[in-house]
Every structure is written in structure tokens, then in C-alpha cells.
Amino acid sequence: MATRMFIDGEWCDAASGATVEATSPVTGESLGPVADGDREDARRAIAAAGAAFNAWAARTGFERAALLHRAADACERRRDELARVCTLDQGKPLKAEAEVEVGELIEFFRMAAEDAKRLEGRIPESAAPGRRVLLLRRPVGVLGLITPWNWPYTMPAEVLAPALGCGCTVVWTPAPSTAVCSGVLAECVAEADFPPGVFNFVLGPGPEVGDELAVSPDTQAVAFTGSTQTGMIVSRQAAGKIQLLEMGGNGPFVVMDDADLDAAAEAAQVGCFLGAGQSCSAAERLLVHEAVREEFVARLAAQVERDVRLGDPLEEATTLGPLNNEPGAAKMDEHVADAVERGAEVVAGGARADGFPTRLYWPATVLDRVPPDSIAVTQETFGPIAPIVSIGSLEEAIEQTNSQSFGLMAAIFTGDVGAGLRYADSVHMGLVNINETTNYWEAHLPWGGRGRSESGIGRVGGRYPMETLTELQTVLIRSEPPLPPGRAS
């Protein structure tokens, strides 16, 4: 298959004619040529989005909702294709994860369609008689949307759909390593027949296309999901614009001595190994009370042995597929080696798996007695790893949690709900789950990092992006005639 760009209502190649070959992390085989755009392509798309903005913003929420539902309908019709291409392009297991992600994609478009009908302003009181004040929500303009490879459908949809719903026009550029499945999603959106220029899809390297979306004077907002390092660059380049940034996480998963260990082990498995650990909400460091550490490690190892199946992601029984790219696999190599050198014990996994079509298959890895200063604990590994660190108290769990600059997601397992709430009150995290995995989130709820952290600003989820991507316009109406001269108004 060939993957092209969509600009101003037309499918097109890169202006330069350049292409790159997409390769599957599953098989190592080619998935076909992908248009390789540059700044010129991004500028054409931005210009088209700018020209389309006023007419699109003038549409009613109900009109925009109808088109969002049509995009969801297209995704429904192509559900099987979307899932299969996601597996081949990203690597996640077809039945266990890719099909689920397609369902989430559809949900975001349906939800945005309904939220578009209910984007309300306010009528505050005026301080003076005979006046009425209207606060109206207006879309900010053209949105440059930059999305990652780990959730190639969910991450775009959670911003793209609300942005279109509230009246913004959009230029979307996906991560190059999942351009093929992103292209199928773009086809579904194009099938909804939005007016030309409202939705645009540009392919190319981040330092070219993504940077142009950030720096262009003709984009009024920038949304980015990805690493902290890249997000900081985007934020600087987009200075002065509306920004919606979801960046890195290093989620602590706390297990206290009064926790339900079976439930905690099951939740840790999901937290550490869903998406092969390639998730900003992953349980990246397990802080386990010393009194129950050995028992918890044994239960987690048994859980992994029983339920995690590394293999061909197109096979129904597979729950863990390959990593998406070689830099991610190399980071796993580095983090595991560093932990072992510092004295950690390998309980499960520990090295790349042999016998697969590519070298990207990493088994679920459990490491016990990991020193808290090892890079598997202090940095975001973004792979299928469960590094277990001993703690002795709730206070130590709080201290360890707040010792890092990330502020996205944390979880705690405890039999004392009060202790769980004290933990939530004390940690600098955007989300805290009590007796639930880090990877649990409901799509209508706000999701994002706390301020003063390296995990971003703003919130996705439900209607929350609409609040960021609209601004209040104040309209004051003097409904009574002026008072006679000499009278106070």
C-alpha cells in the first residue's frame, strides 16, 4: 500500500515527490512507500486550514457533530482493516490491543460529536442595570497536531475530534514509524467529507513538518504527545500559542503491606506490559513494601508466566508483541543491563527473544531488588519492564514518587482508603488511581500532567480539549436606553 498526504480536500504526494519505505516491526517486511513531506507541504496544509477556518467556525455544533459521526461511521466500516494495519505497522497484538484501540478511536469521535452540541457559554450578571453580558466560546483557529507512534489511533483522536467539534481546523502530522496505519485513519476522516481545508494530513520528519506546525505564525494552537525532550522543543518553538502537551511519565505503582496482593499483581501486569510498556501511563517503577515484597514478586512472576504471551501479534493468543522500533529496544537493553550491574535480580525475561522475524521482540521482564538510583527507575524505559524497589512506609512511597520531575500518573494499592487518599493528596501527579492499575483511564475524564512537572500542560479526555482550544468572547448588551443627562448610569 502507498500512503499519501491529504491537503485542502485532495490526496497528494509530497511536493518534492520524495517517499520513504515503511517497514513492519512484526515481520521486517515492507509495508509500502510513504510520502516524505517537508516544510513546503506543511505550509500548504496550514494555508488551507487558515482559509477554511472562518466558514468552519461559523457552522453550528450540530452541523460539525454530524460530520464527526460520519467519520466514526467510516471507522466502523473499516474496523477490521484499521486493526490489522495497526498491528502490522505498530506491533501491538491484534485481538488483545489493536481491536480495542479501534474501539477507543470510534468512541472519541462519537463523544466529540455529542460534546460539540453542548459547548456552552455563560450569562454572568452585569454590575450595572439595563445590561446583559454574554460569554461565548470561540475556536482559537488552526491547530497543529503532532502525535506519537505508541497509540496511533487513540492519541490523534482524543485531540483531533474535539478540535474539529469545537470549530478549529487541523493539520495533523503523525509519527513516521506509524505513518501507514495513520494514513488509514486519515482516509476514514476524509470519507466524512469535511469541507476542504478543515482536516489536513501531512507526513514527514518531525524536525521539518512538526517544527513548521509549531513555529508557523499561521497556527494558533499546537497539540503534542510524545517524549519530554521533544515536547520541550515544541513548547519553545510554539511560544505564545495555545499549547496542549502530553509528555513523558515514569509512573510509580505503590504496593503497601495491607494491599490485596493478587489484585495488585494483576494490575501491575497490566500497568507494566500493556502495549509492551510503551505507554506514558505505564507502571514504570514498582514501589513495594518490604514486608510483602517477596510474596508480591512471586505472585507477579506467576501472573506473567500464566497470562503474558510473547509472539506473533496477528495470532489470537498473543498478548505481547514486538517493540515498535530499534531505539526503544536498545533502551530496554541499556536499562536492564544497568539494573543488573547494580545488583538487581532477573525474575523473568531479561534479554531480547530469539526466533522471531525481527530483533524487536522483548519478553515481559521482572527485576527484583532494583536500586532506586538505577536508570530503570529514574528514567522512562518505555518497554515491558517491571522494576521492583523496596519501601518501608507510606511516607517513603510519597518521597520516592515526588523525587522525580514527572507528574503524569501514579497508582497505589492499599487496604486503607484513607492512606490512599493521603498519598493522592501528597503526590504531584495529574492522576492517581487507588486500587487500580496505572493504565486505567476513562475517555471522558481529564488526563494530563500536573504543573511544575515534565509531563506536560493541559488536559485531553472528553470535552476538556475543547476548553483549551476555545477562548471566551465577552459580549455586553445595553438593553435599556441611556439615562437622562445628569443622572448616574
Image (cartoon, helix red, strand yellow):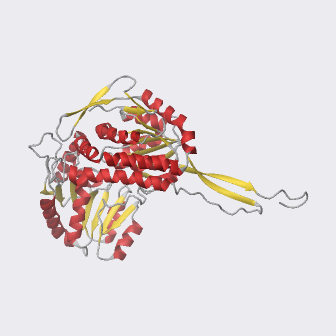
Judged left or right of residue 329, residue 46 is right
Please give the name of the residue rendered at 37% of the width and 69% of the height, measured from the top-left corner.
423
Q: Residue furthest top?
A: 16
53 on left or right of 382: right
Q: Depth check: 398 or 104 in front?
A: 104
- The residue located at (50%, 33%) in the rendering is 48
Residue 341 placed where, x, y %? 16, 51
Q: Pick whichever, 9 or 281, lies toward us.
A: 9
Residue 21 on image: x %, y %: 26, 30
Q: Which residue is found at the position 50% from the left and 36% from the top?
A: 49
| Residue furthest right in the image | 486
- Across and down, in percent, residue 193 comes to 44, 40
Query: Along the line of sight, which residue is nearer the eye, 37 or 160?
Result: 160
* Viewport quadrant of the N terminus: top left
Name the image quarter holding the C terminus.
bottom right
Q: Can see residue 159?
A: no
Q: Nearer the viewer, residue 305 or 455?
A: 305
Counting from the top left corner in percent of width and height, residue 223 is at 44, 45
Image height of 178 relative to 42, above or below: below
33 vs 460, left or right, is left
Q: Quadrant of residue 354?
A: top left
Residue found 44% across the figure and 27% down from its top: 40
Q: Is residue 238 visible?
A: yes
